[in-house]
Image (spheres, rainbow, N blue to C red):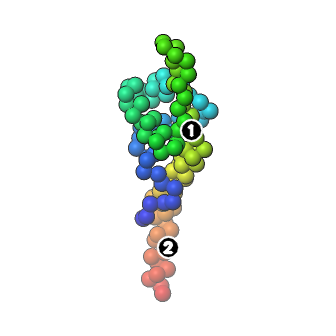
Amino acid sequence: MSTPTGFDELIHPATRLSVVALLAATEWADFPFIRDSLSLSDSALSKQLHTLEEAGYLEIRKEGGGRKRRTKVRLTARGRTAFEGHVAALQAIVEGAGPAAAARDRQQEHAKAER
């Protein structure tokens, strides 16, 4: 089976997929909320956010200064489109592996044998 259209290697690793899925459900999210929701360290989350930002999938804003500095994150339109495409690709993979797919494959093999 070939990789379905929309499958995104950048989003696919579990941590990045979790970050993007969390952000898909909100407009903006604060760094501590994302970190705590996904049980990540500051450095691990920072690394994943940086990778996604470089790809144009996230916008990161730093507000305030000093001890009151806040980092807010959101998906860009490009990131949302990539996430939706990746989810659709994963659904296609799952649907292609289930009992209905096995029955369809058997029917196709039977039809070939009759020719």
In the rendering, at what x and y percent does residue 55 appear?
48, 45
Label 1 is placed on what type of residue? Leu
Q: CA distance from mark 2 to mark 1?
A: 43 Å
Q: SS at mark 1?
A: strand
- The residue to which callout 1 is attached is 75
- The residue to which callout 2 is attached is 107
- For image coordinates 52% across by 55% down, the residue present is 6
| Frontmost residue, 102 versus 45 | 45
The numbered mark, 2 or 1, whose residue comes first in the sequence reads 1
67 above or below 94? Answer: above
Q: Quadrant of the N terminus?
A: bottom left
Q: SS at mark 2?
A: helix
- Classify mark 2: residues with Cα within 10 Å, few (<14), some (14-19) or many (20+): few
Label 2 is placed on what type of residue? Gln
- For image coordinates 45% across by 26% down, the residue present is 35
Residue farthest along the right direction in this orientation = 27
In the rendering, at what x and y percent does residue 53 appear?
48, 39
Residue farthest along the front direction in this orientation = 65
Please state which of the two labelled residues, at mark 2 or mark 1, is closer to the viewer: 1
- For image coordinates 46% across by 42% down, the residue present is 54
| Frontmost residue, 47 versus 39 | 47
